[in-house]
Image (cartoon, rainbow, N blue to C red):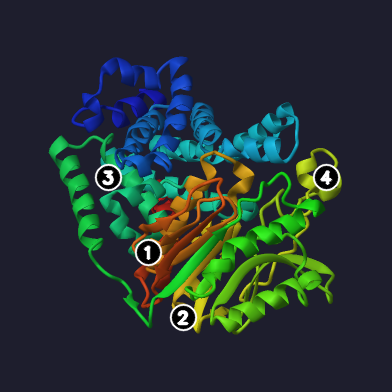
Amino acid sequence: MPLLNLHSERVYSRQSSLIGFLPKRLLWLVTKGNASWFFALFLGALVPLSFAPFNTQSSLFSYLFFLPVSLFLYQCMHNQTAKEAFYKGWFFGIGLFAVGVSWMYVAIHDFGAAHWSLAVFFTGLFVLFISVYYGVFSWIIFKITVTTKTDESNMLLFYLPVSWVFCEWLRSWVLTGFPWLLSGYPMIETPLAGYAPIIGIYGLSLLAILLSTLLIIRLKAIVSLTGMGAVFVGGALLGQIQWSEPVGQALSVALIQGNVNQSVKWDRWQLEKTKQIYISLSRKQWQDNDLVIWPENAIPVFYHTLENTFYHDLELQAKKTDTELVTGLPVFDDDTEQYYNALTNLGGQQGYYYKTHLVPFGEYVPLAALIRGLVQFFNLPMSGFSAGEAGQSPVIIKGYKAVITLCYEDVFPQDMMSQISTSQFMINLSNNGWYGDSFAPHQHLEMARMRALETSRELIRSTTSGISALIDSNGHVMVRGPQFKQAVINGRIQPRMGTTPYVFWTNYPIIILFVIAVATYWWRQKK
């Protein structure tokens, strides 16, 4: 029997699999003929509907994740050539990112002043590139299923989830990384969230794909359903564990959301207006709060130009009322003649944090000499920041050590874990104004919630135009502000001590699984 026919007969029987209960016509369309290419694109486009903002309206949207992903995995198991496998996986990724990161168009067109055609071009180029990871995944699965002569149920139950998460992990650091829309994030609205403090976001992705795999592999329905039920029950039980404990008194917090329009924020004539907005919104907050928090680059001018005037007055006010002001601001270093996206605190033990993980084409421009003239977006004032050094000293705020992240640094959990065990809460200052009324602010808030859940630390999140929020150690939003409005968001956060298992071992168990997968594949091939 030819290899491909043997491959189809051995691996792809629908006998006793849960997906076999779907209409045969649908399964045929997903896997056969020209329609299967459309379905690869369509299934990918459905996946972002399981993320925020949809799953925050109803947790049922989180469960929607399993339908398109399981059908895509089923499709991966029916490819007849490596080329077909790669391109169908690529199509799936294009559908996923074309919908899920459509906010890139908003940033480039609406605020970067690029013509719509250029905005479509650059957004499309990014989507085409980042979707390659799903093509690689589908190609890997084809190679494994064709060349491995073991029972597909045992094999795929291991290799499908591990290969998927391997590609997500690669995406998180290759070319500075883009760990957006990881499969574990929708699970924060399900009982599976209980696993996050133990295995983190990549472990949740592994479980999500494991459950999707149980829907399609050749197992008796009762076995698949029992396995899925056990995973959900385990998550619900683990969710009852408190991994950290309160230390000291809760801190009263006022988040100041200035909502300065992104299109004029960096204009010189807007500076005085911006200063007055933040002064006015903060005026009634000094007496009643321990912390007043301004967002990333709240006052868009170098710190040293206002250090002895504007910021000096703010520091006196903070000390007078026993309050600390935490703000994001650009800082110029006279010694290196470089400038940084930074955070500092006034009114207490002043410290600085310089952002280490910069946004490509946003805060720095690769191949700047070639690109800057093409789109005004790449010529903006904040697109020449330098990266801060790793291992910076923690910032002491109201006597507590705080883990600081700026902008999208909080989507890289591995960068934060070394500080968590000695810190008592987290602060993220961000500027989501670039993305308008798109999915981005909601998706970013969802990822911030996951960091709080993984580390069992409460999180202060202050943004320029929303969504500002206070998040508890279980990843629940305690209080949140509106979008696109000037607002003051008041609440309390509780410093905490104690570490979760994930803080202790970070992503090493997942990496070990990758090594085991490669080793077992090599051993089976050799055998």
Residue 404 seen in this snapshot: no
Instruction: For marks 3 and 2, give the CA distance.
Output: 42 Å
What residue is drawn where x is 43% and y is 38%?
141
What amino acid is found at the position of numbered circle 3 in the picture?
Answer: Asn
**What kind of residue is marked 4?**
Arg
Give percent across and percent down for residue 123: 65, 35
Where residue 496 sits in the image (x, y, percent)?
38, 76
Say which label, 4 or 3, has the lower sequence index. 3
247, 408: nearer the viewer? 247
Residue ID at (51%, 79%): 401
For badge 2, the amino acid type reads Thr
Of tags 3 and 2, which is closer to the observer?
2
- Disc number placed over residue 422 in the picture, else none: 2
Q: Distance from label 3 to label 1 (Cα)?
A: 39 Å
Instruction: Check contact, mark 4 vs mark 3: CB within 8 A.
Output: no
Name the spot of residue 341 as percent of width and height, x first: 69, 64
Residue for badge 1: 472
Q: Which mark is residue 245?
A: none
- Could you say whether the residue bearing mark 2 is in a helix, strand or loop? loop
Q: Quadrant of residue 5?
A: top left
Q: Earlier in the sequence, mark 3 or mark 2?
A: 3
Asked if residue 228 is positioned above or below residue 249 in the image, the reply reads above
Residue at which label 3 appears: 154
Q: Quadrant of residue 502?
A: bottom left
Q: Residue 294, image x and y in percent?
A: 59, 64
Mark 4 lies on residue: 372
User: Compared with residue 324, is residue 24 higher up or lower down, i.e. above or below?
Assistant: above
Q: Secondary structure at mark 4?
A: loop
